[in-house]
Image (cartoon, rainbow, N blue to C red):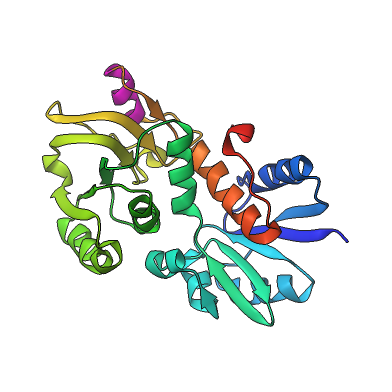
Amino acid sequence: MTKKFAVIGNPIEHSKSPQLHHAFAKHANIDLIYQKRLAPLDGFTHSIQEFFEQDGCGLNVTVPFKEQAYAQCDELSERAKIAKAVNTLWKKDGKLYGDNTDGQGLVNALQALDWTLQHSKILIIGAGGATRGVMYPLAQAGVAHITIANRTIEKANTLIHELQPALSHTTLSTMPLNALSGNFDIIINATSASLSGDALDLPDDLQFKYAYEMAYGKPSHFLQQAQQRNLPNSDGYGMLVGQAIESFYIWNGIKLNLQDFL
């Protein structure tokens, strides 16, 4: 029997998830169909109920419904609890289960680039949901120190305060976005600056070895600055593939190699 999967969001037309999951299925020799589902902004709950009532096996959740998905779940993974957002749903024994694979997708992408995470020092720019979603998996991967830089320092401080108990072996700190400085192994842009076209200026006294942009598919001023310094850099396509591979593993029990799909 053909397994049914989908990605749900609003907007949804841009999603590359169907191509990825169909490529995974071909590689793993699994019979599945994976579609895009546009949910009304006020109709997310009804949309997921309808999907599972029609024998759907698993759903990916994208903007703007990840927090709503989190609130709908009967059972949550540890990383979903910490992220307070869910991007992967499935039903088992009448219960709705939720996980968040975004952070592990980022970790897998960084490891595929051979950027060392163990004992590393990372700067993340932005203190929104994207940052919250990746902090726990980065800590689990052995990152020693994570600094969050944000325009509103209070928001960064609140995030650090909330997450510190779950990340007890990782040193957490904050800095204002307009006062970027220090020496880091990896700098990650988790803001929407690249998508909105806003310039994110990296001062000379901010030193780093690698630069990762969570967004993908558009020119990035952030990455251009890393290129001008002749430093290794990457956009977020690997993270996209990595989180999809994690979802595929949850649903189908088959772990694929990220390198095969980059």
User: In which quadrant of the rendered view does residue 223 lie?
Assistant: top left
Which residue is found at the position 67% from the left and 60% from the top? 251
- Horizontal side, residue 205 vs residue 237: left or right: left
Residue 156 image offset from top left, x and y in percent: 21, 58
Which residue is found at the position 72% from the left and 70% from the top? 51
Which residue is found at the position 20% from the left and 66% from the top? 161
Q: Nearer the viewer, residue 71 or 166?
A: 166
Visible residue check, residue 200: no
What count of labels does the image hold?
0
For the C terminus, which image quadrant?
top right
> Does the magenta segment cover residue 175?
no
- Horizontal side, residue 136 vs residue 202: left or right: right
Residue 48 image offset from top left, x and y in percent: 65, 72
Residue placed farthest to the right in the image?
1
User: In which quadrant of the rendered view does residue 180 lie?
Assistant: top left
Residue 195 image offset from top left, x and y in percent: 42, 40
User: What range is drawn magenta here?
Assistant: 221-229
Residue 103 image offset from top left, x and y in percent: 44, 52
Residue 15 vertical placement versus 95 (above, below): above
Visible residue check, residue 183: yes
- Horizontal side, residue 225 vs residue 258: left or right: left
For the N terminus, which image quadrant?
bottom right
Q: Main secondary structure of the magenta part?
A: helix
- Horizontal side, residue 137 vs residue 259: left or right: left
